[in-house]
Image: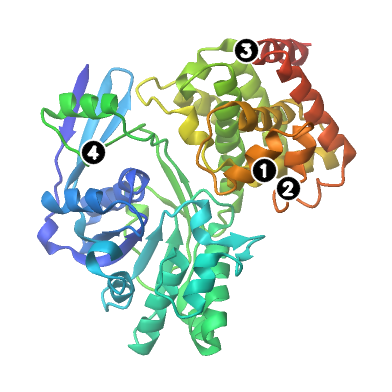
């Protein structure tokens, strides 16, 4: 085992609370904070961060406060762990501990310039790309209740910022959502328009919502990963995060005011994030969702376990290059075959123990952009999409046969998956399958065929499909 420790080289006491990160968890610590860390190392500056959470996680924030916000990132690959000490936090905030006004007050503080979000797909409270006004939490906030959702908290803070006659601010989503900047803008403006049209107009003028594409595999920490980090570090760090060495962040260059040193830390600033976003969502995330369900049906627990199955690995490479890549626009300087092979190599990283049941969570929120959208494109172009069909079929079968995983639509999905015709029942659920696919008989027929194959055993289905693709 080869270990190295790179201590923090900037002075934490010189940092100011200029960035607020809402939804501060493992991915936040291992991805956007690492870019800012490298930017501070390279360029210096006073860009400090306040870490905030809305629901659970008070203990995690208390744990960070106890060590002055310092923690370690463990970049693991094979027999090598590189540890980096991160020291850019200026404090933490949680409504249950600090009061419901605490986060809105931070948004309205004069030094605050950027708000980062990692609140997962369901945290945006949207439906069909717009704020879902039927959600009980949103209704309660609009009726005068305390802000509890990320969207309600953001608008409350922006309302204070406007009242204080402060300048603009940037809200930057770091979640795996297509057009996440536009989605955030739609949700925030949709909420503000229900409250005060003048506030909504102020937001349109003063607040920027750049999109971004994030990529780094950061599995949930386990006892084994905590032990590995403690062994490499020589002591316990309860706030440490184990992740892969690879990282990528592509950010739309659209900031309301001064930009943090993200680019100096390795991020790409571009005019249009969407091509990068689609590439990552379809090739990486689409493959991950496929592995999450098909891999579990095969009895595997982690992504690396799946990669040890040569037939399954071949199916995933076919999915990436023959099905998903065919739906992408050309991207200058990107070799998709090389990108796919790099993804497969990353998937093979046995040190990460990236659990399939973790990836499978909230799949109803992920299927539309990761699998349904490229299926619709391939159907229209009359291209082959057999592995995509198998992926959807594995999801439907898993919903009815595997232990439940967290999903905002878990109950209705499981009921549908246990019907006499589970494929028809699941695919007919509202706001799940895109309108372009719903009326196509060949869409449901192909998934039904794949589902029937899986009834004969997942291993036999993978073997048969792999043989057919080799012909």
Instruction: Identify residue for label 1.
Output: 330
State the residue in front, 415 or 247. Answer: 415
- Mark 2 vs 1: CB contact within 8 A: no
Distance between the Cα atoms at labels 3 and 4? 35 Å
Of circles 2 and 4, the one toward us is 2
Secondary structure found at label 1: loop
Secondary structure found at label 3: helix
Residue at image coords 69%, 34%: 417
| Mark earlier in primary sequence (2, 4) | 4
State the residue in front, 451 or 354. Answer: 451
Of circles 2 and 1, the one toward us is 2
Secondary structure found at label 4: loop
Of circles 3 and 2, the one toward us is 2
| Mark earlier in primary sequence (3, 1) | 3
Q: Is residue 216 left or right of residue 185?
A: left
Distance between the Cα atoms at labels 4 and 1? 38 Å
Distance between the Cα atoms at labels 3 and 1? 29 Å
Q: Residues within 10 Å of mark 1 (few under 14, many from 20)?
A: few
Instruction: Identify residue for label 4.
Output: 240
The answer to which image quadrant residue 150 occupies is: bottom left
The numbered disc on residue 311 is 3
Of circles 3 and 1, the one toward us is 3
């Amino acid at each position: 085992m080869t270990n190295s420790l790179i201590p923090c080289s900037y002075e934490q006491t010189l940092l100011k609370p200029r960035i607020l990160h809402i939804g501060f968890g493992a991915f936040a610590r291992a991805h956007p904070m690492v870019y800012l860390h490298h930017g501070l190392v390279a360029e210096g500056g006073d860009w400090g961060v306040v870490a905030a959470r809305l629901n659970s996680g008070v203990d995690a924030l208390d744990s960070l406060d106890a060590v002055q916000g310092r923690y370690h990132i463990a970049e693991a690959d094979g027999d090598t762990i590189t540890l980096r000490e991160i020291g850019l936090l200026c404090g933490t905030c949680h409504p249950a501990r600090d009061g419901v006004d605490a986060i809105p007050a931070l948004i309205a503080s004069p030094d605050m310039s950027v708000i980062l979000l990692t609140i997962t797909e369901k945290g945006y409270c949207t439906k069909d790309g717009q704020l879902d006004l039927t959600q009980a939490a949103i209704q309660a906030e609009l009726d005068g209740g305390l802000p509890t959702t990320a969207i309600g908290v953001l608008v409350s803070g922006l309302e204070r910022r406007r009242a204080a006659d402060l300048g603009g601010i940037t809200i930057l989503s770091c979640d795996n959502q297509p057009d996440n900047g536009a989605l955030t803008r739609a949700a925030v403006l949709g909420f503000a328009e229900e409250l005060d049209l003048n506030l909504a107009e102020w937001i349109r003028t003063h607040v920027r919502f750049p999109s971004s594409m994030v990529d780094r595999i950061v599995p949930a920490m386990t006892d084994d990963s905590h032990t590995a980090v403690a062994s490499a570090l020589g002591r316990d760090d309860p706030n440490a995060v184990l992740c892969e060495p690879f990282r990528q962040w592509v950010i739309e260059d659209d900031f309301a005011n001064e930009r943090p040193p993200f680019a100096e830390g390795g991020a790409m600033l571009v005019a249009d994030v969407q091509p990068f976003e689609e590439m990552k969502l379809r090739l990486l995330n689409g493959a991950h969702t496929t592995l999450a369900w098909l891999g579990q049906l095969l009895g595997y627990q982690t992504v690396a376990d799946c990669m040890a199955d040569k037939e399954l690995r071949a199916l995933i490479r076919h999915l990436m290059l023959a099905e998903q890549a065919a739906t992408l626009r050309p991207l200058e300087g990107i070799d998709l075959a090389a990108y796919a092979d790099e993804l497969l190599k990353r998937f093979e990283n046995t040190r990460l123990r990236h659990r399939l049941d973790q990836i499978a969570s909230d799949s109803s929120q992920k299927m539309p952009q990761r699998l349904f959208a490229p299926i619709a494109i391939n159907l229209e172009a009359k291209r082959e999409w057999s592995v995509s069909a198998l992926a959807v079929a594995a999801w439907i079968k898993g919903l009815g046969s595997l232990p439940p995983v967290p999903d905002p639509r878990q109950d209705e999905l499981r009921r549908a998956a246990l019907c006499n015709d589970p494929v028809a029942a699941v695919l007919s659920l509202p706001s799940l399958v895109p309108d372009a696919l719903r009326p196509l008989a060949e869409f449901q027929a192909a998934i039904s065929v794949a589902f029937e194959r899986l009834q004969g055993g997942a291993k036999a289905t993978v073997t048969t499909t792999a043989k057919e693709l080799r012909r």
